[in-house]
Amino acid sequence: MDPMNRRRFTFLGLASVATALAPASFAKIDDQTGWQIAELTDDGLRLAHGGMASAGTPVDDQTLFQVASCSKTVAALAVFTLIRDGHVELDRPVNDYLQRWRLPGPGGDGATISELLSHTAGTNIHGFQGYRAGEDIPGLIDILNGRPPANSPPIRTERRLFKRYDYSGGGTTVLQCLIEDVAGESFAQYASANIFGPIGATAATFELKPRSAYALGVLENGQPVAGDFVRHPESAAAGLWATAADLVKIMQSILVSLNGDDAALLPPDLARQMITPVTRGVAHGVFVDAEGVISHDGRNEGFEAAMAADPVSGRVRAGVTNRNGQMQRVLDADHAIHGPE
């Protein structure tokens, strides 16, 4: 899967997630394509699902899917909890906090946490191809250094003009190292204890292979992904397994924080900082449209996901599928939740 397709999917496909949906022809999706939709409104959380997680195993509401770059929003929430607790500062250089490795390249010493979260630090590597079953899995420092068995180049900053936006999974992987160095535990452990537990998304996981039931990936041409799915040790950038309901809880946690509720993960000022654009439409771990809707999406080999939240209405919606090329049809499936008109 060409990782360069990921941002194209965002800008072409996500606009309908948090808007009023027209009646759709969801029945046209073949019965084999697995999917989930979750929606939070004033009436509560609504869930829908269909298709197959694997041969002979239908999807249910608890089936986990790879949600790819939606991982980046969780990474941003993790960073903001470190800011909340006084461990790091948003506008300080990331190299001030890194202990095992330093970000190299032109301007690397000055690249801030905010810039890495907003893809304006000039870091390389748009996306990662991951590792197939049976391939050696590199450690985080091997990935950062581009050292075998890593299959991606060394992560570094490149020359840039005016802090230009350039989507970078590499930059998010630097933040994975930051979180681990500051917290003193793995990113997966930190996210589980400090994000998923508090927001009630306890099935979500950054394990390379989930312990709970999960869907197998399918390519756009209908062929299964070799080895069932691709492993992503670049966890913060692409490694999250979650349900559509988990994605709704992730986005809801931002709205709850904005409102200053007692159960908020972040204080309101930090939540507002998180969703304030650094450059047009790009905030910290989320994208923001002209109406203020916050969103993220993801595309890994065999999986696609999208999630969005409207701070004004409080509506949150997410969809996941285990077949490339089907996400927009899943998102357009209004009567999958509401029933045909």
Image (tube, rainbow, N blue to C red):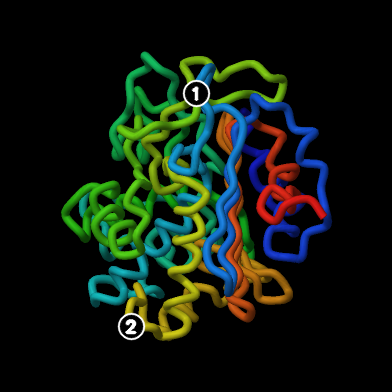
* Element marked by disc 2: loop
The mark nearer the N terminus, 2 or 1, is 1
- Horizontal arrangement in the rendering, residue 296 relative to residue 28 (left or right): left
Disc 2 from disc 1: Cα separation:
40 Å
Residue type for callout 2: Asp
Residue bearing mark 1 = 57
Q: Nearer the viewer, residue 121 or 340?
A: 340
Residue 329: x and y in percent read: 75, 42
Q: Residue at x 80, y 33 (%)?
A: 28
Q: Which mark is residue 20?
A: none
Give the class, few, some or many, for how many residues have Cα within 10 Å of label 1's Cα (few <14, many ≥20).
Answer: some
> Which quadrant does the N terminus fall into?
top right
Q: Position of residue 3 (x, y in %)?
A: 61, 36
Which of the numbered marks, if any, corresponds to residue 262? 2
Q: Position of residue 116 (x, y in %)?
A: 47, 60
The amino acid at mark 1 is Thr
Q: Residue at x 35, y 37 (%)?
A: 145
Q: Between 118 and 55, which is closer to the camera in this rendering?
A: 55
